[in-house]
């Protein structure tokens, strides 16, 4: 072993040993652990325990332990800001207790994210990771887990899983942990389950989140109540995704009862809204109305909140279902006022504007209906971010639905126009001008029909093409892959699938700017497109991740082909030669009897994680 490497390892080991000794003799840490052992359930209970401990001292160390304890209680959704130590007290702490300083930085990063500044939040976590990787393994694992959660919150779900995959096999036993709460790794399994649920991998999500429910049901190590609630919500979402609505409703009953038991009224109302959504999905309008009638007075008595506004939007949708348009119109004005008082309301605005478009449509106000749809799209697009701060287009499904709704509304306008033109033609025929008017009418209707065809073409393009790279989008690719799998199964022919992820893509944005990152994604898409066959399916799966389907191709041939493409890609230069020596990692899997598109993607993801963990810039074959 080289001397500098040996010395660095020795220093890291000594630092960890020293840190452990410092904690064992630290009365503040001992108080922290004793209070955790008593599992305070509310902020009031926590403050009573702190009042009789050394953590009331006016020192920087005591104030940080106080902040860490505060993260365990009174944060029912995880979107409430955390109590943190004053910045003036942290200056000396960074020198005297660096590990404690950087653990406090995790809470600071949470506050940045809650305030909407996700890029800075992730940058702050990267600083914690950089500090702790060699000096404090527990802090390092916790910071990785936090970054994974942040990536999931901004919609980069596979990047979130990739982050956790790096450390998952090396995680310590919970019995060895010293710190708990937000930013701690003990909820990793829960967050993997949640992420898989969001990705549509519902069966795996159910297994993971059911285990998390069992683990968190007794609040081990004073873990927040919401971890248990999140495990229930994860199962509810997965059951809904599998169209197992009865089981989803049963889980929701447990969720609502628990929220009522701990008097968490925001979560209680959230559960009611989820239950209403199930009734809407299953066309159980009678059940939805009964639930609203039995709960609306109690919900009205609660103070204004995000979830209360969400409940009123669901009630608005129920009135539309009943055809009670006057009541819906009156409630619409109330919801406008509630939204004005609700912070971070883009999702609520998007849902409400979409429902409001239906109200306008039913009352014959077609132009306001179109404007409401445009507003809804605008709010949906505000919801999704890249870690580099750019907005990301909302799902192709929503774009397609929006275009379809526009088409329906314009068709109604065309029908009204045709009716008016018909009346005008008959009237003008009496004035011997029928022929001229009819000609004009035909030309005008032809124009309207051309607009309709153009809108239909735009709809089809929105539904199939990635707006940045011009290649297929995820939704279009999944549909096409389903068809190819059916062919492979029917004709007993080989088919291979690969997930490709550009290596170190974030560093391109950091070094050369976001425009360069966009240019690289476009260039890579063009490079792959000209390197594959016309029969192959290539699409942007999300962010810097791509999917490639190779019909009539064994996994051996697919692996050889991908390695050849990787070698050629590594030799390419981009952005005037400023970006070069680029690589990607890929996971590949051959279709086997019983495989589905999503199961193939899951296996490819697992192989991709292996390629990443093995050093990137390589192709890994999925295990059989």
Image (cartoon, grey):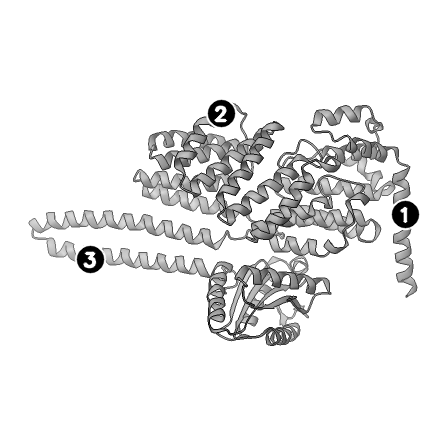
Circle 3 SS class: helix
Question: Can you tell which mark lies on residue 300?
Answer: 2
Q: Quadrant of residue 571?
A: bottom right
**Front-most of residues 90 and 98:** 98
Relative vertical location of residue 525 with respect to residue 305 in this rendering, above or below: below
Q: Position of residue 113 (x, y in %)?
A: 64, 43
Q: Position of residue 39 (x, y in %)?
A: 74, 31
Circle 1 SS class: helix
Q: Which badge, 1 or 2, comes first in the chain's sequence? A: 1
Disc 1 to disc 2, C-alpha distance: 56 Å
Q: Closer to us: mark 3 or mark 2?
A: 2
Relative vertical location of residue 198 with respect to residue 563 in this rendering, above or below: above
**Front-most of residues 346 and 587:** 587
Relative vertical location of residue 244 with respect to residue 561 in this rendering, above or below: above
Q: Residue at x 68, y 46 (%)?
A: 121
Q: Quadrant of the C terminus?
A: bottom right
Q: Which badge, 3 or 2, comes first in the chain's sequence? A: 2
Q: Residue at x 55, y 47 (%)?
A: 238
Disc 3 to disc 2, C-alpha distance: 55 Å
Disc 1 to disc 3, C-alpha distance: 87 Å
Left or right for 516, reference 409:
right
**Front-most of residues 616 and 254:** 254
Badge 2 density bin: few <14, some 14–19, many ≥20, Cα 10 Å: few
Q: Which residue is mark 3?
A: 442
Q: Which residue is mark 1?
A: 17
Q: Which badge, 1 or 3, comes first in the chain's sequence? A: 1
Q: Position of residue 223 (x, y in %)?
A: 71, 37
Q: Residue at x 78, y 40 (%)?
A: 179
Q: Quadrant of the N terminus?
A: bottom right
User: Is residue 582 visible from the viewing direction of this image?
Assistant: no
Circle 2 SS class: helix
């Amino acid at each position: 072993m080289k001397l500098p490497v040996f010395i660095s390892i020795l220093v890291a080991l000594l630092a960890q040993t020293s840190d452990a000794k410092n904690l064992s003799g630290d009365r503040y840490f001992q108080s922290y652990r004793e209070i955790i052992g008593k599992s305070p359930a509310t902020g009031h209970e926590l403050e009573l325990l702190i009042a009789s401990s050394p953590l009331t001292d006016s020192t920087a160390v005591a104030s940080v332990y106080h902040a860490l304890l505060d993260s365990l209680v009174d944060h029912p959704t995880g979107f409430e800001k955390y109590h943190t130590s004053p910045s003036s007290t942290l200056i000396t702490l960074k020198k005297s207790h660096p590990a404690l300083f950087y653990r406090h930085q995790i809470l600071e990063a949470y506050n940045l994210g809650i305030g909407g500044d996700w890029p800075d939040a992730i940058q702050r976590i990267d600083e914690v990771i950089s500090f702790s990787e060699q000096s404090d393994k527990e802090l390092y694992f916790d910071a990785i887990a936090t970054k994974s959660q942040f990536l999931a919150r901004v919609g980069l779900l596979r990047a979130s899983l990739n982050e956790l995959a790096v450390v998952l096999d090396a995680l310590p036993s919970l019995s060895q942990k010293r710190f708990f709460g937000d930013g701690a790794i003990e909820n990793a399994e829960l967050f993997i389950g949640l992420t898989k649920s969001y990705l549509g991998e519902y069966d795996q999500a159910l297994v993971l989140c059911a285990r998390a429910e069992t683990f968190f049901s007794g609040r081990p190590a004073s873990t927040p109540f919401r971890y248990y609630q999140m495990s229930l919500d994860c199962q509810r979402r997965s059951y809904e995704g599998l169209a197992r609505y009865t089981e989803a409703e049963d889980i929701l009953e447990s969720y609502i009862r628990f929220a009522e038991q701990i008097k968490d009224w925001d979560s209680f109302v959230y559960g009611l809204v989820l239950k209403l959504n199930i009734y809407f999905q299953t066309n159980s309008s009678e059940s939805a109305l009964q639930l609203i009638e039995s709960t609306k007075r109690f919900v009205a008595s609660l103070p204004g909140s995000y979830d209360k506004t969400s409940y009123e939007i669901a009630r608005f949708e129920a009135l539309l279902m009943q055809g009670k348009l006057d009541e819906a119109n009156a409630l619409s004005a109330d919801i406008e006022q509630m939204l004005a008082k609700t912070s971070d309301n883009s999702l609520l605005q998007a849902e409400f504007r979409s429902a409001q478009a239906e109200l306008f449509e039913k009352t014959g106000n077609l132009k306001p209906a179109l404007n409401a749809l445009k507003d809804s799209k605008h709010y949906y697009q505000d919801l999704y971010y890249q870690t580099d701060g750019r907005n990301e287009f909302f799902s192709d499904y929503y774009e397609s639905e929006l275009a379809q709704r526009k088409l329906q509304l314009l068709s109604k306008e065309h029908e009204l126009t045709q009716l008016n033109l018909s009346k005008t033609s008959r009237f003008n025929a009496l004035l011997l001008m029928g022929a001229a008017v009819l000609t004009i009418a035909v030309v005008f209707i032809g124009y309207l029909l051309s607009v309709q065809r153009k809108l239909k073409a735009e709809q089809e393009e929105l539904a199939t093409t990635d707006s940045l790279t011009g290649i297929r989008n995820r939704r279009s690719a999944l549909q096409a892959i389903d068809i190819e799998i059916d062919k492979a199964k029917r004709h007993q022919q080989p088919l291979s699938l690969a997930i490709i992820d550009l290596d170190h893509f974030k560093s391109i944005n950091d070094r050369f700017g976001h425009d360069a990152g966009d240019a690289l994604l476009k260039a890579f898409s063009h490079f792959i497109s000209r390197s594959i066959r016309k029969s192959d399916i290539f699409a942007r799966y999300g962010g810097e991740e791509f999917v490639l389907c190779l019909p009539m191709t064994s996994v051996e041939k697919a692996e050889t082909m991908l390695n050849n493409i990787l070698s050629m890609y590594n030799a390419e230069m981009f952005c005037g030669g400023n970006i070069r020596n680029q690589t990607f990692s890929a996971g590949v899997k051959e279709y086997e009897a019983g495989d589905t598109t999503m199961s193939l993607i899951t296996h490819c993801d697992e192989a991709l994680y292996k390629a990443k963990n093995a050093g990137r810039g390589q192709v890994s074959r999925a295990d059989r």
